[in-house]
Amino acid sequence: MIKVKDLHFKYPRNESNTINGIDFEIKEGEIFGFLGPSGAGKSTTQKILMKLLREYKGEIEYRGKPLASYGDEFYQDIGVSFEMPISFSKLTALENLEFFKNLYKNTVDVEPLLKQVGLWDDRDKKAGEYSKGMKIRLNFVRALLNDPKFLCLDEPTNGIDPANARIMKDMIRDFRNKGGTVFLTSHIMSDMDELCDRVAFIADGKLREMDSPRNLKIKYGKRSVKVEYRENGELLTQEFSMAEIKTPVFCDLLRDKEIETLHSGETTLEEIFIKVTGVALRA
Amino acid sequence: MPRLTVLVKGEFDRLNKYNLFSANFVVLLFWVLLSWFLEGEVLRTFLPVIFLMDSVMMTVLLVGATLFYEKKEHTINSIMISPVTENEYLLSKIIVNVLNSMITVLFISVAVYIIKGVTYNYLVLVPAVMIVTVVHTLIGIRFSYSAKDFTSLLVNFIVYAFLFLMPSVFAALGIISAEVARYLILLPPEASSILISAGFQDVELMKILFGYGYLAVLALLIYRYAVKPKFNEYLMKETGV
Ligand SMILES: Nc1ncnc2c1ncn2[C@@H]1O[C@H](COP(=O)(O)OP(=O)(O)O)[C@@H](O)[C@H]1O
Ligand SMILES: [Mg+2]
């Protein structure tokens, strides 16, 4: 869907590059994520892919043609939500959506979407009176207005309560399951772990690692099992490597001792991120 | 509905919701009130000033205010990731302001006819107000690019008005010789003033033709070299919200 080769970008007034030579590909029908701390260059990359920042170096192809060769019809099939929720504050939520909706050829009915994100009852409230979380959900609906094929979401779940974040994540997955492609960015590890088919680690404008969350965990995880058990009233722990769990020592332990807990030594994406980049996700 | 129509309709909708229409209307009422107290020749000299002020100053301020809100609320980014082109967007601003100026012409003309029975050459006035509004919409957009906030836009405008109106005032006071004053038509507000005054008094045909030609070329040049190329840069410029 999108191929990026050796992308560099510098903001006109900055001295150094914000994006320092990144390569990646977003395949049709996948959820591809950029995970990285604040200031890493996630939003900048999103704006470049959305043709808003045009003075980049490197190659970007969308559906096999250079991104720059597309005119404004490019946006017919694309849904975007920015990091900062955007709306006309003095228009109601519905008026906001109606205005944007009329700018597209293909559109969807907003009622089911607003109901899904729990905003239908507040549809006639001015967007300026919405809470931050409501504004974010309204922007998500805005991104879906034109029945897009490609969704580009910048920090979609940041600043939203867990219940609504869950609804949004389900909607993003549904979108993918119906054949849509998603590029999303976040600094929230658990969201990326749950949602992404593939995730790239970004720090200081460079990509450090890219794979499915599962493969990353296998590659960097400890791959061990830790057993806590009681013997003569005393709590003991023993750790086994994946090879060792096939041995009688492990099986005997499970059979003979009073086991309290059994943990696989799976490492979280966050720990892997720190290990790979040397940077913490949250400052 | 064509996209341009959607943009124009949306813009009017917002002028209304953001109370910019009401602000504009208060100014119109003020003009009507002033006309009430003026008579005969004084009124006839004052009317072109109203239309000049409206199509120059109100246009710049209205453009500034709408762009300021769009920047502050980042809605311009949301418009730009839709199929709307830069040309459509900029053109919609021009159309909206021309329509607004037409509303002013209609409102004031009807009002002064009713209260004073005054008429003038509407067929000459309308195109003049149109072209003046087009030029000043573009100037307003260009000012907004470099303005940090609405106040700095106001300052820019006052500097512009001062620089370009002073020579005309000097000429009127006889400080500038008639010889030099002939060239003042090269100042946009002076050219605007000449075209609009043609609706109320006789103006040399050459001056009118030159004025239209000059403002048309000026509008194209501003659009092509001062507004269009910097649009994307303006779009991406983060203003302190
Ligand atoms: N408009 C801008 N002008 C100059 N520098 C910017 C601008 N926007 C972002 N930056 C800088 O670029 C870097 C990356 O920012 P960003 O892409 O927003 O990171 P992220 O989205 O990963 O938090 C930061 O150092 C930021 O200060
Ligand atoms: Mg960001």
Image: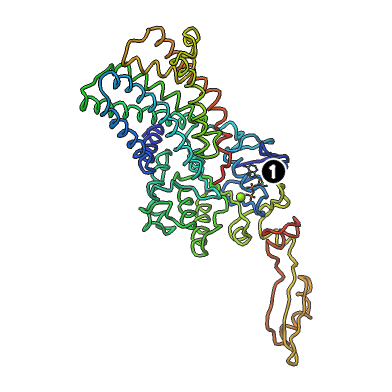
**Relative to residue B86, is residue A209 depicted above or below?**
below
Left or right, A196 with reference to B75: right
**Mark 1 neighbour class, 10 Å CA radius: few under 14, some 14 to 19, many 20 or more:** many
**Relative to residue B134, is residue A136 depicted above or below?**
below
**Is residue A7 among the parts visible in the rendering?**
no
For the residue pair B150 and A140, the one nearer the viewer reads as B150
Outermost residue on the bottom side: it is A232
* x and y percentages locating residue A3 in the rendered image: 64, 41
* x and y percentages locating residue B23 in the rendered image: 36, 39
How many numbered circles does the render carry?
A: 1
**Relative to residue B241, is residue A68 depicted above or below?**
above
> Does the beta carbon of the residue at mark 1 sit less than 8 Å from ligand 1?
yes
Q: Secondary structure at mark 1?
A: loop
Residue at the image point whose x is 35% and y is 17% from the top: B197
**Is residue A196 among the parts visible in the rendering?**
yes
| Quadrant of residue B195 within the rendered picture | top left
Left or right, B128 with reference to A29: left
Chain letter of disc 1 in the image: A
Residue at the image point whose x is 33% and y is 37% from the top: B26
Residue at the disc numbered 1: A18
* x and y percentages locating residue B33 in the rendered image: 28, 32
Left or right, A202 with reference to B8: right
* x and y percentages locating residue B225 in the rendered image: 56, 23
Residue at the image point whose x is 49% and y is 65% from the top: A163
Q: Amino acid at mark 1?
A: Thr
Q: Which quadrant is home to the C terminus of chain A?
A: bottom right
**Relative to residue B221, is residue B30 depicted above or below?**
below
Q: Which quadrant is home to the N terminus of chain A?
A: top right
